[in-house]
Image: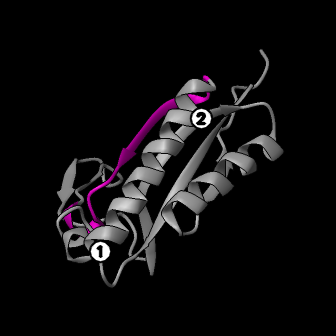
Amino acid sequence: MTQYFLTVPHDSASEPTMESMQEFDPAELAAVMVAVDGFNTALKDAGALLFAGGLNPPSTAKTVDVSSGEPRVLDEPFVVAPSYVGGFWVIDAADDAAAVEWATKAATALQSRIEVRALQEAPDA
């Protein structure tokens, strides 16, 4: 099995958070939450879920930089981009096709985009 990183992109201009999601239509938000819970349950039941989580927006990030030889803590993300990773799943899947199938289910639950990337494996010794 290969491990895959399924990411949920968010728009940097709006930086959605759990608090800002309260501004959504309550029925639509509830439907999405139920769909995501169902997706998470399906992943668990299949033994595919390794870890999942939601991330705070980039405006809350700290970047630790030691490239100058001394550690510096910067109150900023390491990169400014039009989109950022807002949440993720790390899953086990047999191959790219299986990972894309899971991502399709996640995208359907969220009514959003999902990026699929395999984690690098250690080279054979």
Displayed quadrant of residue 27: bottom left
Q: Horizontal and vertical percent for residue 110? A: 49, 62
Residue 68 lies in magenta, yes or no?
no
Q: Which residues are magenta?
A: 47-60
Task: Identify the mark nearer the N-term, 2 or 1.
Answer: 1
Q: Nearer the viewer, residue 58 or 37?
A: 37
Mark-to-mark CA distance, 2 and 1:
25 Å
Q: Callout 1 environment at 10 Å: few (<14), some (14 to 19), or many (20+)? A: some
Give the amino acid type for the residue marked by disc 1 in the picture.
Glu
Q: Nearer the viewer, residue 75 or 100?
A: 100
Check the image and report above or below for 76 versus 103: below
Could you say whether the residue bearing mark 1 is in a helix, strand or loop?
loop
Q: Quadrant of the N terminus?
A: top right
Could you say whether the residue bearing mark 2 is in a helix, strand or loop?
strand
In the drawing, does residue 113 fall left or right of residue 54? right
Residue 15 has which mark?
1
Q: Horizontal and vertical percent for residue 82? A: 45, 81
Check the image and report above or below for 70 versus 48: below
In the drawing, does residue 94 fall left or right of residue 43? right
Q: Residue at coordinates 67% horizontally, 46% vertically from top-left?
A: 102
Q: How is the image coloured?
A: one colour
Q: Residue at coordinates 29% horizontally, 71% vertically from top-left?
A: 16
Marks 2 & 1, CB-CB < 8 Å contact? no
Residue 91 has which mark?
2
